[in-house]
Amino acid sequence: MLSKIPKVLFVMLVVKPLVFVALGLNVINRDKLPQNGPAVLAANHNSHLDTLVLLALFPISQVHRVRPVAAADYFLSNRFVSWLSLNVIGIIPIQRMNSGADKEKLFDECHRALSNNDILLVFPEGSRGEPEVMSGLKKGIYHLVKEHDKCPILPVVMRGLGMSLPKGTAMFVPFNCDVVVGDPIDEFQSSDAFLVDMQTAYDALSKHCVTQVL
């Protein structure tokens, strides 16, 4: 079993100071974050800071239950990054579909985490896009949660993080950022309805953002 101590210390001593001191963070509807699992946070994805910001929003007593779902080909690419990702951040590595992954086993560890009442952090675009530009959504989350009765998906919109640490750079730039948490959705009629409902939720949440991105 993964020890929760390294993750708790990392979030408390590194992540929270970075997020709440270095970033001008405007969090809306933080009270809507789930208190326990199973649950899925589905956020847009522009930066590696996205995961850290979402982890920082949870109380220390709960953070060990929050499991980011991340691309195995990137986060297991070398020994140090792999150790940090698996043993400290506690990611669930997942193979991208274009890497020859077995569809039947793709979400095995995600299913185990949800059955263990964990909270998953998932990015339905699949990968980081251009700063502050949302890419097309994928249906993977729908196929994951449909096997878990009434497992809620909470849409989350983040703005500004793509400017603080955009894809392809390693230079952190302090920037004002928004995080807007939406109402949980626990039922979709189909995978196509999932795409429509989630995009509608993202569009509505985006209207609450106050950060101006040039």
Image: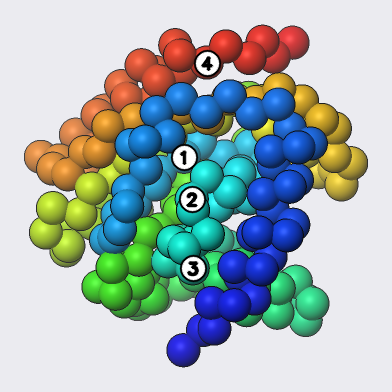
Residue 209: numbered disc: 4
What whole-number distance in Å separates the C-alpha atoms at marks 4 and 2? 20 Å
Residue 43: numbered disc: 1
Residue drawn at the location 75% of the way across and 71% of the way down: 81
Q: Nearer the viewer, mark 1 or mark 2?
A: 2
User: The residue under label 1 is which amino acid type?
Assistant: Ala
**Badge 3 element:** helix
Residue drawn at the location 64% of the way across and 59% of the way down: 11
Sequence-wise first label, 4 or 2: 2
Residue 130 visible to an observer of this rendering: no
Badge 4: how crowded within 10 Å, few (<14), some, or many (20+)? some
Q: Nearer the viewer, mark 3 or mark 1?
A: 3
What whole-number distance in Å separates the C-alpha atoms at marks 4 and 3? 28 Å
What whole-number distance in Å separates the C-alpha atoms at marks 1 and 2? 15 Å
Q: Is residue 206 left or right of residue 162?
A: left
Which quadrant would the C terminus be assigned to in this image? Answer: top right
Residue 58: numbered disc: 2
Q: Is residue 120 left or right of residue 164?
A: left
Sequence-wise first label, 4 or 1: 1
Residue in front for this viewpoint, 210 or 165: 210
What whole-number distance in Å separates the C-alpha atoms at marks 3 and 1? 19 Å
**Badge 2 element:** loop
Q: Are marks 1 and 2 in contact (CB under 8 Å)?
A: no
What whole-number distance in Å separates the C-alpha atoms at marks 4 and 1? 14 Å
Q: Quadrant of residue 208?
A: top left
Sequence-wise first label, 3 or 1: 1
User: The residue under label 4 is which amino acid type?
Assistant: Cys
